[in-house]
């Protein structure tokens, strides 16, 4: 029980020594990758670069104790950083002390929301977000993130904006003010990162570029010719602080906190599941929410802004041999050592290089492949993708998310409210009943209609079934007996029982008998308690369709005989 | 095609004379009922009583042309009136000219929203609202409506409030200021209405009470002893006006307009469906949205506040013999004649009597029966009902709706994201495959797992299936062949295909073969276009499970032979 809440108790006490070398190698590799990424992503979030390293320390340690994935690498990620910049940017000027405080408060709020959802075991909540919507949103966000770094890459003074067109317009108008040394550092950095990646994916391209660019800037005194540098960075681990706690901004931050909780969890769980499947391991979606929530919550007290599990570092972690969360503890150690001893080295790190790191990273997020895939395979989903993409680009991140969620919900309700139903007939000479659409040879009898309902029944899909049965009775007024096979029904909520009662009442009014077959235990109990069993009659329940049909034919004969006998 | 959009073209040109007497009788009965109800419901909405008659005129005529139900009686209803009072009350003082203008603008907005949703054929959108949530919300709203009429019933000055406790507190504190003549009129009116209903449900109790109370007030000059009366009412039909059109309040009214569009449609469609089933008629949910939308939209230009189809008048309409929307046209004629010639008679109508009409009407909305039903049958749904009920009472109508919608959505996603899957085995000596849980006698073979998926696949439920199959492969690492029976799958969106590709990739990594049986045409096409067919191989598709299993056993043998042959 306790080890379900703190999975580290489990893997920690049963740690297999043979995993150590893999965990150590992966931990160091990811730690080395975290340094430049953390500094760069803080820039996306509009925070001083050092906050990217703070976000790469405590949250990682906390997740290692409470998370269920052995490979997931938690820390600052591009998308969440963009959401922070969007949300906090509306409330405080970038670079101000208040801005930093709000970003940390946001991490606290995200932590509380995710922790609460996790403890309520609401890990399923992201099921309603559709893949095309998410892909369209991510691509648009990546473009916005990348273009916002044009300023740092080129030295052109462009105000931060969520409008791609505004950024391109400003860049175009002010093309003359490109700062050539800055541009050279930026493009050079990109070339190094992309080039080294071509040589080997295992090389720490970002870190190598950082070292080269910093050294070049320092020795050539590029900062004196106007190349923007990170400047003095405070040394030491983040000191615990509660100064961000305050109530005045809670209401204003709530929408963005909800968005980050959802988007962050969504990104993380997708990555965690994919690597768990590869390793034949199980992850617990709700415990993942709890783990991420605690990482953000505790992280906030150590100056961390919102974090989540990211794709690229997780892939590297796995490739380098991570088997347990111990790897993450090694990564955190690298970041900790850097904070303690190496921060002076970042003084001459040019911002243009961080911009280069960001731009290379987000190019991978623009999902052209999915567009091509949907163009070939599913035009409806393509339309959803493009709608969300354009809405996000044209109307901004926040409306983009809202529209995406709205479109997803509509699409979810539409698809989920139409459960599968099959009309059945008897296979000649057997006691098996099959779908009449699939097996044209099955026997059916006038006056007896047999339906199988292929879904558990609940308020959301029961209307479809009522409509279907009402349609049948309108189209085939001669129906005398309706047999419903409820074998695939595992649950039936109160709305479903109301609907069945309603169907039964309508049938009775028309003199149609209702027979039920294959009703399972829990559904049977619900029928019993609600009085539905009593209304239909105990003798209307049958184990097998065949038995129900036998009774149906008996009733049909009685009915026909009655008709012949009647004086009318 | 045109008669789908204007159903009146259809029933009008094929009108069966034998329906005329029923339609006429029903139309007059409902028209007579509409007069007191309209005046009373306008009071709930915080509008001068005459606006209740305006709302009972043009919208009814419009719906008669565009609606698909032969029995539905459109017009002012209690719940929508309460929502109007809640929404508009925040923006303008009750009784002011601005208040009236905003209520009419609201009808226009509701009309636009419903019309748009109807034309987009979004009639399914209310499927996600759960029955217990709606019942809890309705009961709470009925209490709030009823208690807000205490003021008019007793003469105690109680400010309008959405807080039941505030109303009861104010009433208790000011109990001394009860105005006895007012209370006598109110309670007397209630006694008449309830008493006449006991005598016969067909008697127009409300109208008789109106006549008696008005006459008594006029002859006894009760208004001079302080009984509040309706006062001078303008005569004549509502003149067309566009003066409500303006943009300044649109954003403020939007949330309440959305709530009314949803709640109003929900109430109306439930009633319409129930009577359609009784008459073996079909109604078109999306066309109903269109019809209600046009009724509200056009109505706004004739001084109508938001309307919808209501339960009580529809039941009376049906009982009195309504067969087609012609009945509604007769009702509207009664209202029109009243507006033209009878408004002077309403001058002495006491407000306490309207309060009595409202209170008698809303008692029927407090749904104690459902609480008792759920107490016996489904404690989870009972908790949902009580949560929404208490949230609405304690936090107000608007938060009540929001919480209800939120809880419904969560519950919808939770239930819909868990589709039914069955593990199959072969019935001994046959070619039929059945659920191993249901038929313990079926034969299974080590290394071969057969699953049937009992739902169409889409982004919302595909994770559950992925999790289930990953769980299987983790629990039974010896599985060599996985047979998926996709016969119940009618549709598969792009997320579902991604998931299947993912499953296939994972299986390949582990050397497990994937075979598919019973794939239907449209799903097969989607597989083809997306490249999934190519990835799995044409030879992995089979018509029947039995054929797929035959191939599975062939592959198992090859695998086992290979194992035996291999030097390891």
Image (spheres, coloured by chain):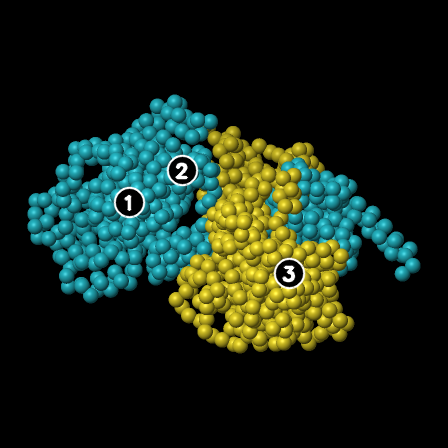
Chain colours: A cyan, B yellow
Residue A147 seen in the current view: yes
The residue pinned by badge 3 equals B272
The residue pinned by badge 2 equals A115
Tell me which residue sits at (74%, 42%) in the image.
A534
| Chain to which the residue tagged by mark 2 belongs | A
Residue B516 seen in the current view: no
Q: Tell me the SS state at disc 2.
A: helix
Tell me which residue sits at (41%, 26%) in the image.
A10
Q: Are circles 2 and 3 on residues that touch, CB within 8 Å?
A: no
Q: Tell me the SS state at disc 1.
A: helix
Q: Position of residue B40 (x, y in %)?
A: 59, 62
Q: Is residue A218 above or below residue B35?
A: above
> Which quadrant would residue B49 be assigned to in this image?
bottom right
Mark 2 crowd level (few <14, some 14–19, many ≥20, 10 Å Cα): many
Mark 3 crowd level (few <14, some 14–19, many ≥20, 10 Å Cα): many
Residue A103's tag is: 1
Q: Tell me the SS state at disc 3.
A: helix
- On the rendered structure, is B449 left or right of A452? left
| Chain to which the residue tagged by mark 1 belongs | A
> Which quadrant would residue A284 be assigned to in this image?
top left
- On the rendered structure, is A99 left or right of A499? left
Q: Are circles 1 and 3 on residues that touch, CB within 8 Å?
A: no
Tell me which residue sits at (12%, 51%) in the image.
A227
Tell me which residue sits at (43%, 62%) in the image.
B92
B232 and A314: which is toward the camera = B232
| Chain to which the residue tagged by mark 3 belongs | B
Q: Are marks 1 and 3 on the same chain?
A: no
Mark 1 crowd level (few <14, some 14–19, many ≥20, 10 Å Cα): many
Q: CA distance from mark 1 to mark 3?
A: 51 Å
Q: Position of residue A1 (x, y in %)?
A: 46, 27
Q: CA distance from mark 2 to mark 3?
A: 44 Å
């Amino acid at each position: 029980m306790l080890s379900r809440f703190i999975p580290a108790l489990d893997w920690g006490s049963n740690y297999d020594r043979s995993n150590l070398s893999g965990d150590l190698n992966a931990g160091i590799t990811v730690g080395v990758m975290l340094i430049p990424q953390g500094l760069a992503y803080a820039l996306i979030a509009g925070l001083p670069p050092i906050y990217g390293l703070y976000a790469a320390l405590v949250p990682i340690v906390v997740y290692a104790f409470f998370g269920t994935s052995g490979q997931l690498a938690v820390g600052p990620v591009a998308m969440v950083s963009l959401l922070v910049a969007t949300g906090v940017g509306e409330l405080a000027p970038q670079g101000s002390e208040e801005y930093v405080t709000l970003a940390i408060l946001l991490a606290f709020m995200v932590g509380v929301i995710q922790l609460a959802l996790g403890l309520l075991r609401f890990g399923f909540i992201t099921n309603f977000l559709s893949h095309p919507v998410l892909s369209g949103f991510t691509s648009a966000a990546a473009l916005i993130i990348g273009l916002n770094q044009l300023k740092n890459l080129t030295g052109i003074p462009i105000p931060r904006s969520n409008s791609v067109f505004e950024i391109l317009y400003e860049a175009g108008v002010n093309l003359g003010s490109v700062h050539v040394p800055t541009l050279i550092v930026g493009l050079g950095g990109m070339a190094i990162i992309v080039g080294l990646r071509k040589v080997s994916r295992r090389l720490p391209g970002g870190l190598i570029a950082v070292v080269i660019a910093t050294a070049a800037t320092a020795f050539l005194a590029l900062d004196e010719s106007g190349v923007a540098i990170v400047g003095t960075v405070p040394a030491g681990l983040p000191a615990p602080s509660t100064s961000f706690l305050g109530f005045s901004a809670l209401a204003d931050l709530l929408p963005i906190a909800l968005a980050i909780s959802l988007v962050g969890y969504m990104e993380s769980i997708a990555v965690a599941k994919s690597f768990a499947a590869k390793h034949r391991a199980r992850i617990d979606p709700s415990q993942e929410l709890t783990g991420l929530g605690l990482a953000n919550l505790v992280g906030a007290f150590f100056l961390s802004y919102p974090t989540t599990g990211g794709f690229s570092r997780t892939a590297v972690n796995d490739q380098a041999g991570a088997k347990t969360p111990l790897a993450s503890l090694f990564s955190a150690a690298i970041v900790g050592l850097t904070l303690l001893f190496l921060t002076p080295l970042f003084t001459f790190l040019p911002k243009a290089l961080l911009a280069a790191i960001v731009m290379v990273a987000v190019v991978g997020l623009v999902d052209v492949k999915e567009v091509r895939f949907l163009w070939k395979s599913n035009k409806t989903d393509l339309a959803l993708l493009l709608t969300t993409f354009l809405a996000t680009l044209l109307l901004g991140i926040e409306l983009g998310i809202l529209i995406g969620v709205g479109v997803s919900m509509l699409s979810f309700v539409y698809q989920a409210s139409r459960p599968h139903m099959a009309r059945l007939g008897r296979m000649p000479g057997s006691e098996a009943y099959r779908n009449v659409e699939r097996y044209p040879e099955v026997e059916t009898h006038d006056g007896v209609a047999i339906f199988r309902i292929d879904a558990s029944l609940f308020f959301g899909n029961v209307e479809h079934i009522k409509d279907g049965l009402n349609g049948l009775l309108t189209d085939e007024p001669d129906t005398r007996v309706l047999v419903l096979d409820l074998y695939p029904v595992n649950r039936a909520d109160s709305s479903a029982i109301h609907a069945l009662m309603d169907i039964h009442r309508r049938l009775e009014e028309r003199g149609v008998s209702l027979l039920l077959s294959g009703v399972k235990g829990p559904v049977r109990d619900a029928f019993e308690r609600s009085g539905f069993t009593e209304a239909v009659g105990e003798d209307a329940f049958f184990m097998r369709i065949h038995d129900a049909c036998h009774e149906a034919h008996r009733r049909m004969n009685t009915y026909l005989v009655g008709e012949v006998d009647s004086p009318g």
